[in-house]
Amino acid sequence: MTREALLEKVKEIIKPYVGDGEAFDNLTEASDLINDLKINSAHVVDIVLDIESEFDIMIDDDAINDMTTVASSIDLIQSKME
Amino acid sequence: MLTEGNTWFNMANPRPDQILKALPYAHPFLLVDEITEVDDDHIIGFYRLREDEYFYKGHFPGNPVTPGVILTEIAAQIGLVSFGIYFEMTKENQTVKNVVPLFSSADVDFFKPVYPGEKVMVTAKKEYFRFNKLKCAVEMTNEGGDVVLKGSISGMIAGKNE
């Protein structure tokens, strides 16, 4: 899957949890999930669970701490899919 | 020694009374009387609304009825905090100190009023507990067995591990 395709999938997954609609419209890979997109940290867990089922991967407790931005989320998915 | 104030040591099968002792609340905001069942999949607990609860004075004057936000809190203290403490206690090799429960989401419907003196039963079923987040399907019933609250609640437990 290309990075662009992954970005689209990730956007689709995080959309229901984004607290700031305008920030979502301006989303880039650099967007920070909590600070820019105003996602509550408990919903980051939901995003991880949705990512796991969408991509059929397992994300461990340590990896979630690296998932701070859209880019790092995509990196994590890519590393788990290899 | 299993509990010392707000600190406990891990154990394989925490008893309901050990969970009750570890709850970080105090009067007038401790809203759990009893835990009767707990395992990895579910928890059942009870609370009796006292006739002299502080919120009845204002909700409503001369017509006391339990606020929905209090029913939600009872559901959360049993279904998220007590249940979450159970999971923390069963984790291996941990001593947990100064538990801070964080209520993150509630999506509940209310079906019947609860009046002073009524006893309610809360049953919470685990949907998942991962990355320290607990999400449960929760139901509250009155003594007649009628459902008074039903929905989904989630929260996180922040504990300082030694």
Image (cartoon, coloured by chain):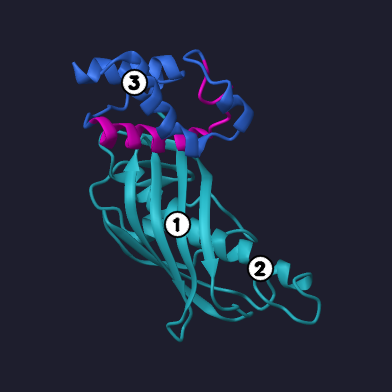
Chain colours: A blue, B cyan
Residue B134: horizontal and vertical position, in percent?
Answer: 39, 46
Could you say which disc has been placed on residue B152 in the image? 1
For label 3, the crowd category at 10 Å Cα-Cα, with few meaning under 14, some 14 to 19 and many 20 or more, is few
Amino acid under disc 2: Pro
Could you say which disc has been placed on residue B67 in the image? 2
**Which segment did they paint magenta?**
A31-55
Question: Are the numbered discs 1 and 2 placed on the same chain, yes or no?
Answer: yes
To which residue does mark 3 refer? A5
Query: Which marked residue is nearer to the observer: mark 1 or mark 3?
Result: 3
Q: Secondary structure at mark 2?
A: loop
Quadrant placement of the C terminus of chain A: top left
Question: Are the numbered discs 2 and 3 placed on the same chain, yes or no?
Answer: no
Q: In which image quadrant can residue B65 be found?
A: bottom right
Amino acid under disc 3: Ala
Q: Is residue B137 magenta?
A: no
Q: Chain of mark 3?
A: A
A65 vs B82, nearest the viewer: A65
Q: Of marks 1 and 2, which one's residue comes earlier in the chain?
A: 2
